[in-house]
C-alpha cells in the first residue's frame, strides 16, 4: 500500500498542468470519484490494523497535496482567462485620455456671476434678437441720435415704425428695460449675454462678443454705491490692491455717466504694454440710470434711483489670461481652449 502511495505521489509530482484541459484531466485522474486517490481510500479499508495509522497519515498528506495542486492551478488559470478577456484589441488606435474643459469665456462669466452674487445680484437673461425699442428707444436713444450709428447695428427686419425695427442687440442693456418692466424695485441683477456689432473682424474687434450688464434700482441708490460695487468687483477679479478711476463719459441711458478704469494689475501702474504705458485699463461704462429710462419702464423716478454698468467679457478674459487676439475665443481650436483651468 505504501508503495502505491509513493507511486501515485511521484505521478502527481510529474504531472504538467498548463491549460484548462490539462487541469480537468488532472482532476479526473487523481481527484474524481473514479480517480486514483479514491481507489487508494477504498483500498485503505483492507489495510491491517497495525499499519492503518501510518498509511492513513500518508494518504491524507497525498490528498492535501493533490488538492493544493489542483486548486492553485485552477485559480491561476481562470484568473488569466479573465484578464485575457479584459485586454482590448491592442492593434486599435489609442483612445486619448483627455477630459474637456470649460471655455475661457465661461470661466470668466462664472467668476463674474459668483462675485456679484455675493453682493446680492441675481442673474437675468434676455433675447439676442430684439426690437429697436428695447435696444435703443427705451434707453433714451433719440430717433436720430449719433449714438445709434456708433453701435454698428445688424438690422434683421424693418417694422411699421422705427421702434419696431428688429435687430441683433448691440448691447445687453436691452435686458435692463425688460427686467424693469416686469420687476418692481428693489431690484439688483446682472445680465450676461452675447451681443453683435457690424465691425470688421480683427485681433481687437469681433462682430460678436459678450457683455455683462449690471443694474441696481431702489430708494436712495447713490453714485457712491456704484463706485463701491465696482471697486469690490475689480478687487475680487483683478487682485486686492486694484484701484479704480472714474472718468466722465456719456451714455444716453445714464446721467451722470462714467467710464471705469482699473489700475493696471500687470505693472501696478508703472506702465506696460497692457495699459499702453498709462497705468490704467478701461473696463466698463457706467452711470446713474436716467430718470426718463426709469419712467419708460413704469418706475417712479421721484421715488427710486438706480445705477447701471456694462462691460465686455472678452476684454476681461483677454486681460486676465493675456490673450492678444479676440478671434481665438471663437475659433474653437482645442489647443487654445484646453489651456484654461480656472481663474
Ligand atoms: N451699453 C454700453 C455699451 O455697450 C455699456 C454700458 C454703459 C452699459 C453704461 C450700462 C451703462 O449699463 O450704465 O457700450
Image (spheres, rainbow, N blue to C red):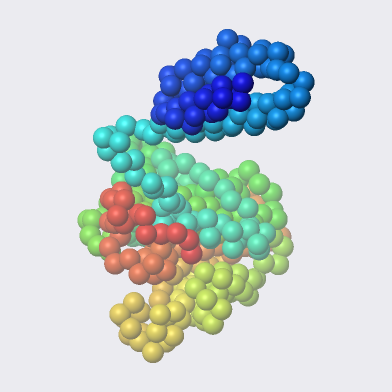
Residue 300 located left or right of residue 243: right
Residue lying at 66% horizontally and 47% vertically, measured from the top left: 183
Q: Quadrant of residue 231?
A: bottom right
Q: Position of residue 289 (x, y in %)?
A: 56, 62
Residue in the picture at 43% in, 21% down: 22
Residue occupying the point 52% across, 25% down: 7
Residue at point 44%, 79% (across, down): 265
Does 265 appear above or below 148?
below
Image coordinates of residue 16 in percent, x first then y, are 42, 28
Q: Is residue 173 left or right of residue 156?
A: right
The quarter in which the N terminus is drawn is: top right
Outermost residue on the bottom side: it is 270
Residue lying farthest top? 34
Q: In the rendered image of this protein, does residue 66 appear above or below residue 235? A: above
Q: Considering only vertical position in the picture, is 318 above or below 84? A: below
Residue 57 as seen in the image, left or right of residue 128: right
x, y percent for residue 199: 26, 55
> x, y percentage for residue 103?
41, 52
For the residue pair 139 and 28, the one nearer the viewer reads as 28
Q: Is residue 307 above or below residue 110?
A: below
Q: Is residue 205 visible?
A: yes
Count of picture labels: 0
- State whether residue 295 appears in this view: no
Residue closest to the eye, 236 or 294: 236
Residue located farthest toward the right when viewing the structure as drawn: 49
To which quarter of the image does residue 307 belong?
bottom right
Amino acid at each position: 500500500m505504501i508503495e502505491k502511495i509513493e507511486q501515485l505521489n511521484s505521478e502527481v509530482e510529474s504531472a504538467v498542468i498548463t491549460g484548462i484541459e490539462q487541469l480537468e484531466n488532472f482532476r479526473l485522474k487523481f481527484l474524481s470519484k473514479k480517480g486514483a486517490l479514491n481507489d487508494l481510500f477504498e483500498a485503505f479499508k483492507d489495510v491491517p490494523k497495525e499499519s492503518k495509522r501510518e498509511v492513513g497519515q500518508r494518504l491524507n498528506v497525498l490528498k492535501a497535496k493533490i488538492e493544493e495542486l489542483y486548486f492553485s492551478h485552477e485559480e491561476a488559470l481562470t484568473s488569466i482567462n479573465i484578464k485575457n478577456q479584459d485586454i482590448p484589441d491592442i492593434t486599435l488606435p489609442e483612445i486619448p485620455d483627455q477630459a474637456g474643459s470649460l471655455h475661457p469665456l465661461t470661466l470668466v462669466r462664472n467668476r463674474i456671476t459668483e462675485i456679484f452674487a455675493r453682493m446680492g445680484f441675481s442673474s437675468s437673461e434676455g433675447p439676442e434678437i430684439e426690437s429697436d425699442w428695447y435696444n435703443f428707444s427705451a434707453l433714451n436713444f433719440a430717433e436720430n441720435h449719433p449714438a445709434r450709428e456708433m453701435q454698428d447695428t445688424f438690422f434683421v427686419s424693418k417694422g411699421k415704425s422705427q421702434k419696431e425695427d428688429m435687430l441683433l442687440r448691440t448691447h445687453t442693456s436691452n435686458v435692463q428695460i425688460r427686467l424693469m418692466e416686469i420687476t418692481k424695485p428693489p431690484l439688483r441683477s446682472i445680465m450676461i449675454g452675447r451681443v453683435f456689432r457690424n465691425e470688421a473682424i480683427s485681433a481687437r474687434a469681433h462682430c460678436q462678443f459678450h457683455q455683462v450688464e449690471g443694474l441696481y434700482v431702489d430708494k436712495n441708490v447713490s453714485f457712491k454705491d456704484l463706485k463701491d460695487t465696482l471697486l469690490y468687483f475689480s478687487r475680487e477679479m483683478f487682485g486686492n490692491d486694484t484701484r479704480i478711476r472714474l472718468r466722465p463719459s456719456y451714455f444716453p441711458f445714464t446721467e451722470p455717466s462714467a467710464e471705469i478704469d482699473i489700475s493696471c494689475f500687470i505693472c501696478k501702474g508703472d506702465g506696460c504694454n497692457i495699459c499702453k504705458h498709462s497705468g490704467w485699463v478701461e473696463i466698463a461704462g457706467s452711470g446713474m440710470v436716467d430718470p426718463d429710462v426709469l419712467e419708460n419702464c413704469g418706475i417712479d423716478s421721484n421715488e427710486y434711483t438706480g445705477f447701471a454698468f456694462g462691460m465686455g467679457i472678452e476684454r476681461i478674459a483677454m486681460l486676465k489670461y493675456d490673450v492678444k487676439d479676440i478671434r481665438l475665443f471663437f475659433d474653437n481650436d482645442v489647443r487654445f481652449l484646453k489651456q484654461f483651468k480656472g481663474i
